[in-house]
Amino acid sequence: MSHSGKYRRRITIQQPVESAASASGETTLSWVPLDVVWAEVLERGSREVYRAQQVNPEVTVAFNIRYRSDVTADMRVTWDGRTFHLGGPPIPDARHTETTLHCVEQA
């Protein structure tokens, strides 16, 4: 199904889920889908970040989706085979018709 208007891309919003502690006391973090939604994708730019003695490319993308109150800053977005972590809390517009997710992809 194609979608007209500005929301033309399908993204998956994922939430973290910790598994029960193992016998050694370690928990495992898994990502499970919260929802698959239509989004407007706005690529904002890229830069190189120096971490752990390596230069890593970092891509910043904004995803505009229809308003949601259940998305939190600890979630992530997958789109086009890529994974983006939210760079802060979701930002609703003044009329609560749209929410912007500012995300960072690290390659």
Image: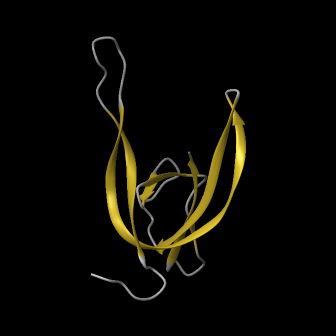
Looking at the rendering, which quadrant does residue 35 occupy?
bottom left
Q: Residue furthest bottom?
A: 4
Judge from the rendering whether residue 61 lies leftward or rightward of residue 5; answer left or right.
Answer: right
Q: Quadrant of the N terminus?
A: bottom left
Q: Quadrant of the C terminus?
A: top right
Judge from the rendering whether residue 89 lies leftward or rightward of residue 7; answer left or right.
Answer: right
Q: Which residue is painted at 33% across and 11% down in the image?
A: 24
Q: Which residue is painted at 37% across and 19% down in the image?
A: 26
User: Measured along the vertical axis of the image, is residue 23 above or below residue 7?
Assistant: above
Rendered location of residue 100, percent (x, y)? 56, 68
Rendered location of residue 52, percent (x, y)? 67, 27
Q: Residue furthest top?
A: 24
Q: Which residue is painted at 55% across and 61% down in the image?
A: 90
Q: In the depicted view, which residue is nearer to us: 58 or 14? A: 58
Q: In the depicted view, which residue is nearer to us: 62 or 74? A: 62
Q: How many marks?
A: 0
Judge from the rendering whether residue 90 lies leftward or rightward of residue 81; answer left or right.
Answer: right
